[in-house]
Image: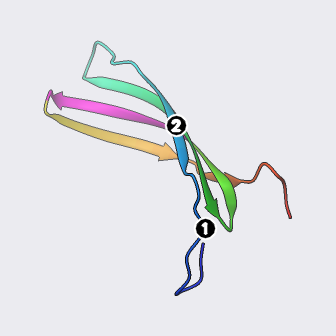
Amino acid sequence: MSAPGTFDADQNTLGAYLLAAYRLPWYGLEPLVQTEIFRFSLPLGEYALRPSAGLNIYFDPAVVLRFSYTYSRLFDLAGPE
């Protein structure tokens, strides 16, 4: 993070996610779990890990309602400075 009027040095930002879901044969229900990891430069940490769980409800093929809960955690692999 940079102060107003300044710029951060060049940096790489990386990210990946894994999603698993299974549509149940009744009521259009689809439970899911997902986890994401991001690498970027912030004063609070270098990495963000975001596991989540949710439920998709299919009313028809074009209308889906999603409920989800996500927990975000920032950390730095180098440890505290």
Vertical relation: 12 (above or below) 32: below
Label 1 residue SS? loop
- Specify whether 12 is left or right of 76: left
Whether the magenta-drawn stretch holds residue 54 is answered as: yes
Vertical relation: 2 (above or below) 25: below
Spot the residue most to the top.
25
Main SS class of the magenta portion in the image: strand
Q: Which residue is mark 2?
A: 16
What amino acid type should be assigned to the residue bearing mark 2? Ala
What amino acid type should be assigned to the residue bearing mark 1? Ala
Residue name at image x 29 percent, y 12 percent: 25
Vertical relation: 51 (above or below) 81: above
Residue name at image x 22 percent, y 36 percent: 64
Residue depth check, mark 2 versus mark 1: number of the one nearer the observer = 1
Vertical relation: 17 (above or below) 72: above
Residue 1 location, quadrant: bottom right
Whether the magenta-drawn stretch holds residue 37 is answered as: no
Residue 10 location, quadrant: bottom right
Q: Which residue is mark 1?
A: 9
Q: Nearer the viewer, residue 47 or 59?
A: 47
Q: Which residues are magenta?
A: 51-61
